[in-house]
Image (cartoon, rainbow, N blue to C red):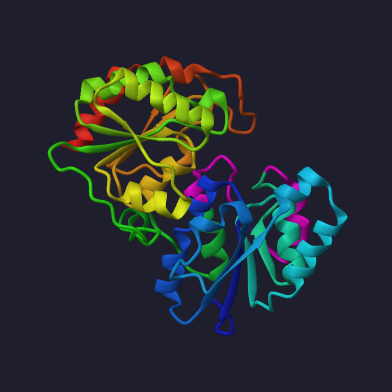
Amino acid sequence: MDANIQKIAIVRLSALGDIINSAVVLQFIKQKYPNTSVEWITEEMFSNVLQGHPLIEKLHTVNLKKLKKEKSLTLLKENFNYLKTIGSFDIIIDMQGLIKSALVARVIGKKTHGFDKNSTRESLAALFYKTTSSIPYEKNVVKRNCFVVSDALGFEITDTMLLNKEPIFPITKEFTLQNEQKNIAFVIGASWPSKIYPKELIAKVCDALQEKAYIIWGNEKERKDAEWICSNSSYATIAPQMRLDVLISYISHMDLLIGNDTGPTHMAWAQNVPSITLFGPTNSRMIYQTPKNIAIKSPSEVNILKIDKNDFSIKEIDYKTIVTKAKDLLA
């Protein structure tokens, strides 16, 4: 890395799972360049997960989702005027690789770095970068995140480093859980209906494991599904509603997490908690598998360049397979 690079901006706006997986780079940057400060730009709605992170000098938020919804020129002006005032950086790294994130990076400054035109779904984003990195879009998302940052800064993030990483987020709240049984969290929601494992099968998993199961929910529909699971399995308990930063601490106390391909599920890997991620229309490219963080994929084939949101094959995953893997991890 250029010795003059002392101040770095990272642009990773959304989504929650991607932000969680991206934040692993912070510890490696600090290990290699302890005197370098890092500032992060994200969507306002996801800011809780990064707020107060000890390795982030400053957290900046934009509200592009609201801007897209309301189509407000005033809001557009407010967001971009703010970005112009956050200061100068020696390098601005766009970890997202979309036109919107590339534009945000370019508004902040000229010394931008991101994926090249062959390494992202929106190739026009590369036009906004001064320098680029090349890595196939089909590669594992965590490795892509690490590569675009380490390539920009002139060092390597290895598999050994990832396997031996520290927990990504600090624990901001302590929880006292029972110790007579294992504590297992279930993440039952997801952004698409086709990514959701059936509640009827989750109840069967709870009954088969006979441990203490905490059902995590994030909206009204998920709450009703959680209540259904709890009413159909004496081993299940509904988890409280929590902010994202508190949820990370909650998951950090678990012995195991089982969930769909969605942000809260990725928190387990982030915090070095054993996990099973269930995949239907997506695949294990979305997580970094370790001996204690594993994927179970439905029988369907996935084209990562053209995701089929109508692929409901996740319901074909045998609940007994989940139970067997869970027992192995708990042992």
Which residue reaches farthest left?
Answer: 180
Q: Is residue 200 above or below residue 84?
A: above
Look at the image and say whether residue 309 sits in the magenta stretch: no
Please provide percent x and percent y for residue 281.
53, 25
Please provide percent x and percent y for residue 147.
52, 57
Q: Nearer the viewer, residue 142 or 158?
A: 142
Q: Nearer the viewer, residue 112 or 16?
A: 16
Look at the image and say whether residue 135 sits in the magenta stretch: yes
Residue at image coords 41%, 53%: 246
Left/right placement of residue 216 relative to residue 84 reads: left
Which residue reaches farthest bottom?
Answer: 4
Q: Is residue 147 above or below residue 221?
A: below
Quadrant assignment for the N terminus:
bottom right
Which residue reaches farthest right?
Answer: 73
Quadrant assignment for the C terminus:
top left
Q: Is residue 200 above or below residue 51?
A: above
Residue at image coords 22%, 36%: 329
- Quadrant of the rendered structure where residue 152 is? bottom right
Work out whether residue 254 can be spotted: yes
Please provide percent x and percent y for residue 251.
34, 47
Q: Nearer the viewer, residue 14 or 154?
A: 14
Work out whether residue 134 can be spotted: no
Left/right placement of residue 107 relative to residue 195 reads: right
Q: Nearer the viewer, residue 7 or 70?
A: 70
Residue at image coords 85%, 58%: 74
Q: Which residues are magenta?
A: 121-144
Please provide percent x and percent y for residue 190.
51, 33
Task: Report the number of discs.
Answer: 0
- Quadrant of the rendered structure where residue 104 is? bottom right
